[in-house]
Image (tube, rainbow, N blue to C red):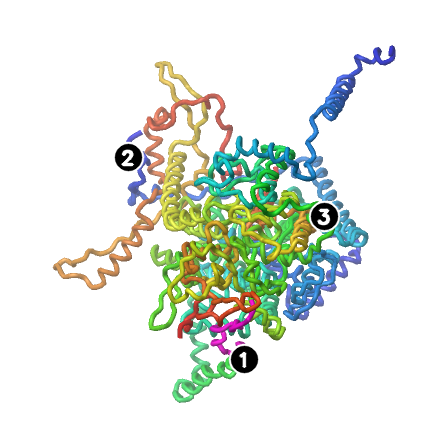
Amino acid sequence: MSTQQNPGHGDEVVAHEGSAPATHFENPGLPPHRPRQADVNPAAAKRAERQIVILFAISIIGTIGTVVAWSLVPPGDTPSSMRLSNFLIGFGLFLSLMGIGTAAVHWAKTLMNDHEKVEMRHPQRSSDETRAGAVEVLKEGAADSGIGRRGVLKGAAVTSLALFPLAIAVPLIGDVGGSWDVSKLKHTIWRKGVKLTTDPAGRPIKAADVTIGSVFHVIPENLEEVDAHERLNEKAKAVVLLVRLDPKDLKEAEDRKGWSYDGIVAYSKICTHVGCPVALYEQQTHHLLCPCHQSTFDVADGAKVVFGPAKRPLPQLPIEVDDEGYLVAQSDFHEPVGPSFWERLK
Amino acid sequence: MKALAARRHHRHAPVVLLLLALLATGVLYAVLAPTSADAADSASANDIEAGDKLFQANCATCHGPSAEGTGSAPSLIGVGAASVDFQVGTGRMPMAMSGPQAQAKPPQFDAEQTAQLAAYVASLGAGPGIPVAEQVDPSKGDAANGMALFRTNCAMCHNAVGAGGALSEGKYAPPLLETSNTHIYEAMATGPQSMPVFSDANLTSDEKRDIIAYIDAQREPSPGGINLGSLGPVSEGLWVWVVGMGLLIGASVWIGAKSS
Amino acid sequence: MSTTTPSRGARAASGTADYLDQRTGIGTAVKGFARKIFPDHWSFLLGEIALYSFIVLLISGVFLTMFFVPSMGETHYEGPWAAMQGVEMSQAFASTLRLSFEVRGGLLMRQIHHWAALLFMASIVTHMMRVFFTGAFRKPREVNWLVGFVLLVLGLAAGFSGYSLPDDVLSGNGLRITDGVVKAIPIIGSYMSFFLFGGEFPGTDIIPRLFTVHILLVPGLILALIGLHLLFVVLHKHTQYPGPGRTDKNVVGYPLFPVYTAKAGGFFFVVFGVIALMAATMTINPVWNYGPYDPSPVSAGAQPDWYMLFLEGALRLMPGQTEYVIGGYTLSLNVLIPAMVVPGILFTAIAAYPFIEAAVTKDKREHHVLDRPRNAPFRTAFGVAFLTAFVVLALAGSNDLIATQFRMSINDITWAFRVLLFVGPAFAFWVTKRICLSLQRKDRELVLHGHETGRIVRFAHGEYIEVHKPLDEYEQWLLVSYDSPRPLEIEPAEDSRGVRRKGYRKDRLKQRVSRIFFEDRVEPVTPAELAAAHSHGEHDTIAPAPEHDQITSEVGSGPASETDTETRNR
């Protein structure tokens, strides 16, 4: 074993360019054909045939089973009966299909002729003559059209063809966006004096009901007055989370000191990342966790982001208490709720 | 007798003897095993005293000798009997190892001891009481209303059917399907650890029962077959690769292989 | 030839054939096509899994359209499912519940449809991997690779539009996320959001629009492109694995009729059968547990179907600080990078790779014989690195489930994946390339020295050797018949007179890229080398080299013969 032959370290091995037969091995051609059991042994062939017939028979049984199950085992009223119906029809279908599939494949593998055959390929490229011919006919056609001599004609054709899609696209796209009034994104239905109510029942909430460590899912009381086909649109911006903290733990910005009530704060529930409801409230850490992409907001500190892909804190809803003790909003949010968009601050 | 003795060498004799022995053991166990004590209906002064003793031995190290709390554990004054029944009944307390949160494990105390501890803590300050059977009876609840409440208030932590979910920093909301209805009620009322408190002003007692009815309905088998953990598209995606592609690649190899 | 009169069946058949041929000239097609040769290998069936699951999607989909109502109009549920009694929901959701609980076989069809959709995407990815790792995308099949790539993207669109149709909380939150992503697009984002939803989110138009996309636009395009995809396979003829008798100028295999009619036709039934079995036994997309869509609730474990997890993971991994306000306008890179840039990079890499490789190798020959992945170390390593990135992103999209199942901190998992997204592919690239090169060297060893037989021979003078069995010519051909391109050589920077050559910079760049592809390589054994290995005498040929494994417990238990069909059909 000389080191020249040692293939250990991956570098090129010199090919002997000069001696032509020694540069590459020759393709040895197809290997000899090995007969299968079924080719040489008639008993094996018979056995294979029987197996194939059995598989087809299983398929027929499966089909019958499916139809019987469909007729006799309806889904019914309970999860168990639905599950049984689903299983019986499905399993029957499985047998019906698998039987045919395995029978066909088994047939091909054991009984059908398995001598390999060779077919020659042709280069994809068309022959030079064909190509020349193609160029010829194109040239003829171009000459016939007269387009070569008439430049203005060409320009006019191209221009009109380029423009006509507008005639289709503008009507097609024009009304697809409804009113196109994107300024609606900046406002919700919260107004001064609108009561905070529980979601989904709509019960107004008294400040005294909100204990430290609790969380209320809130919708504005005027949501039920919104038209049915707009209601979810408004709910999608108006949902709010209400929590109560010990006022000692609550850090408030100067200009927001009046926005809370005795440790009760209200924040928009729509994540400022891409809009999922931020609903997981961790009572002991005062963190709000969004389940979609794990943005985490600190309710004790203006709902600012402490982890995750969100950038902006959750918008805060300024709240106060009316003379009956119910929690009400002081106004709409002071910024657009939800995910960012280009003209958000304009 | 003679007939029986004559058959003592029969080849089935060992099997019969084994079955008889098992039967005997089972009967003896059933007769002699200690029964679990029924919880006392009302807290007697004896219960509170017994509970105090248990408390000092097992809980005071962390919660303080009068349950006033220490740096390691919060105060238990005002948490109510429901908290104790939940925490001790699910085995979370006494906490066995430190970690992001207390984990449910086999309870260390039996029902009588748990009731005594609950009575003692309840005597320290008024708090949520243990719910009566009617309050947690799923047949009296409305599963549809329960689902509407569950998906707004609970599903984001516990998953749509209560299969559990992740919180931050290693904390988690546990699965609910194996939790008893009483413990579910108590957890809502007391807000253990990260879970918020759902007082009766937030979720009324009937609403809590509706939620229990919904979870109870989730314990039925799924109409579509095995539920793959009810974990959603990720587990479905995993199984389509393992089962679906696995079987089909296997079938492909079979089809492509030469027959013998 | 039989002298008896032909049977009635035979006469009917020939009558039909005559009728058709007189009107369509179909005889030419039958003559040319029926006995067309296709090469045989199990990995060629992966694309068929995709094709057949698409057919299953069409069949089950038609069933579903008979009952599904694509409307967001409100209704109240009055069916058998207790937890939804009286609940207000859209018609889309209500009709999905009716399908699942009241239509016989309806739940089965829904589950068949959804499992088939997941399988469709899984098989496309597997098929693409096979095509990539064997180099089947090389000339003349680059265009077909692009067609396949577009089919992949259309499959994503079909899946996404499909699972959003029931209008449940899970897919509805997915639509909300889509809306958030669209809004982040600069300048036109909010308008595009209105375009999609016909106004504000969620509106009442999105489900009917997705329905049109899902049953008409996307399937139409997919069908057309599948037709084109298969047309190319017929035009180019199928590729084949290297082996004895196989060259770039022939196809070795079996005829379409009857072998592939039976195998491929049977495989359709097998695929459909497996999907039916899964639908009969495994629950998928239980929308009755998620509830009708409302913007307020959300479930823990909120993920899209598996093939969208890479996007979900990217969104979860991106840190949030990168949102900027420029001149009063908000640019949310924390959303745009994971949702647009990352998939942009991934998709561009897939689409462009054949052209990049062709430019680097300057290989203009047609290729019909596939590469064994080990013989293209850069390509294989690149593919594994790409898959690693994809898998890391998909796992990142499931980080909350990993956290719950393994009791870990979701924040730590997120950080780990942030690092792994970059480190993982680099590491996977390096490891894979080393493995490929090692496998090539092992092949060289095998050719030069043959198989170890485990027979130990002791000479009279006391020396022990292990006898090696040389390869037969068929197995040897498989191991030596590959190309090993060398890095590009370029003309020197300065010509003979010392003048700097124009275009040197570009050439140098090309050479650098070429080196990255081909510098580490192992060339195939040549006959001269083999002869040299043998010419050191019988003794040396069968003597193990010092660095070979010492005689182990394999003494006396050597392999009988390695020339069987396993190696030939690999």
Which residue corresponds to mark 2? A4
Specify whether C265 is left or right of A338: right
Q: Chain of mark 1?
A: A
Which one is earlier in the sequence, the residue at label 2 or at label 1? 2
Q: Which segment is the magenta one? A: A173-195
Q: Give amino acid for label 3.
A: Glu
Tell me the tag on residue C326. none
**Is C221 rendered above or below residue A162?**
above
Same chain assignment for discs 3 and 1: no
The x, y position of residue A346, in whole percent, is: 40, 75
**Is C541 rendered above or below residue A82?**
above
Q: Chain of mark 2?
A: A
Tell me the tag on residue B134. 3
Mark 1 is surrounded, within 10 Å at the Cα level, by few (under 14), some (14 to 19) or many (20 or more) other residues, namely: few
Specify whether C106 is left or right of C267: right
Residue visible at 74% across and 62% down in the picture: C78
Tell me the tag on residue A175. 1
Q: Main secondary structure of the magenta part?
A: loop
**Is A188 rendered above or below residue B50?**
below
Q: Give amino acid for label 2.
A: Gln
Q: In the image, which is nearer the foreground, mark 2 or mark 1?
A: 1
Using the numbered discs, state the Cα–Cα distance from disc 3 to disc 1 in whole angstroms: 57 Å
